[in-house]
Amino acid sequence: MTDTEIFEGLKEILAVMKPHLDTSSATLESNLVRDLGIDSLSMLLMSLALENKFKVNFDTTRAPFTTVGEVVTYIRENQKEQ
């Protein structure tokens, strides 16, 4: 799966989670907290949705994600074979 496909899938999830958010303005450099308003509960819900959509398990011991690009890279590097 390409970074673009993962990014578009992430934006779809964000659009459902945060309907007021204009996901068209999101970029790989967007800060999850500052730019997209993701709080700790939203991060957990987003992680669960991403795990389901992309068949990936998030490592709970790693440092929290800061940007959309970090999430996309993590998914690409850790996605299970489908």
Image: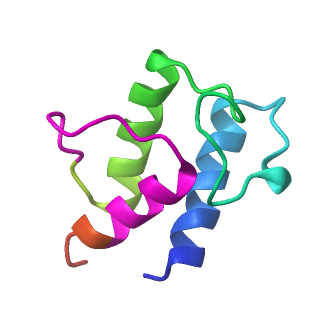
Q: In this rendering, would 64 be left or right of 24?
A: left
Residue 4 location, quadrant: bottom right
Number of numbered discs overlaid on the protein picture: 0
Q: In this rendering, would 51 be left or right of 39?
A: left
Relative to 16, say whether 44 is above or below.
above
Q: Is residue 29 visible?
A: yes
Which percent across, then down, holds residue 23? 78, 48
Relative to 74, say whether 79 is above or below.
below
Residue sitting nearer the eye, 41 or 29: 29
Q: In this rendering, would 53 be left or right of 58?
A: right
**Where does the magenta region start and end?**
58-76
Instruction: Based on the picture, tell me whether residue 67 belongs to the magenta stretch.
Output: yes
Residue in the picture at 23% in, 66% down: 78
Which percent across, then down, holds residue 74? 33, 60
Quadrant in which the C terminus appears: bottom left
Residue in the picture at 64% in, 41% down: 14
Residue in the picture at 85% in, 43% down: 22
Which percent across, then down, holds residue 71? 44, 53
